[in-house]
Amino acid sequence: NYSKLIRECIRSFGSQDVDFPWEMIIVDDGSTDGGHVVAANEARRCQHDVFIERLDVNRGYSSAKNHGIRMARFSYVKMIDADDMLYDDCLRNGFEALKSGCEFVHGPCLVHHWKKNKWVSGGLHRMESEWHKHKDGSSPYLGIHAQGTMYLRSLHSKFGMYDETMRSKADREMWARFYHNGVGMCRTDHIMAIYRQHPMQMSRSLEKKSNLKSVNDYFDDVVLRRKNGDMNGLDMLI
């Protein structure tokens, strides 16, 4: 339910200055605040193809993303949540990195905080320090910000889609899966997205905070199983 925020998200795509074709796929995961109407009105202003798919019920984060991936027609995927925004030249910088031989590229994100009825810049997101902490270790995927990624869609044909049993950390589990299967992952220093922190944000929900230990334990278990070759429960992109 991000009807008040999705307009800026869509505009951040429309303002990208690129010389290659792209499409925008918006998956409304059963929202109840009229977000699909806002998205449709804003999409009319966009000069690129925009497809809006409204799911009848809330199926969860991973299922909604998989739905969009299956709809996609092009070779590269840039995923972003409805309350966040692409940074200037994000698509161009990501595309150039992927064309240079990478299969998966990630970069830093800025964070904007909602304070006193306005957005306030907070500099680079804390995941930047996590990246420098983990980049030379055995788990560099722990330092990747989900909003700062772009990758080859074909990876889903080889290593599976988002795990729909996971209501949290499904992005990171997939990055781990890519990493453990030898996917060519590279880093760009270009800022890729603006991550907006606000009271409605899912990651700030009390339910998630209260279940943090069980979420982390489940994540660790899934990553280990997948590292050992257990891909049960994953759908492959056909």
Image (cartoon, helix red, strand yellow):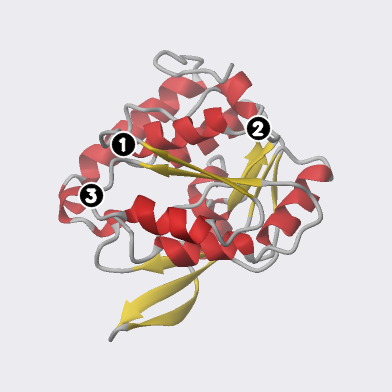
* Label 1 sits on residue: 60
Q: Going by the picture, which residue comes out furthest to the bottom?
A: 116
Rendered position, 45 above or below 61: below
**Residue shown at 76% from the left, 44% from the top:** 98
Tell me if mark 2 has few (under 14), some (14-19) or many (20+) residues whose alpha carbon lies within 10 angstroms of its own.
few
CA gap between label 2 and label 3 equals 28 Å
* Residue type highlighted by circle 1: Gly
Compared across the picture, whether 102 is left or right of 9 comes to right
CA gap between label 3 and label 1 equals 14 Å
Percent of width and height locating residue 124:
52, 72
* Label 2 sits on residue: 73
Marker disc for residue 32 = 3
CA gap between label 1 and label 2 equals 23 Å
- Can residue 130 be seen by looking at this rendering? no
Circle 1 sits in a helix, a strand or a loop, which is it? loop
Mark 3 and mark 1 lie on one chain; the one further toward the N terminus is 3
Marker disc for residue 154 = none
**Residue shown at 70% from the left, 57% from the top:** 188
Compared across the picture, whether 18 is left or right of 219 comes to right
Tell me if mark 3 has few (under 14), some (14-19) or many (20+) residues whose alpha carbon lies within 10 angstroms of its own.
few
Viewer-nearest of discs 3 and 1 = 3
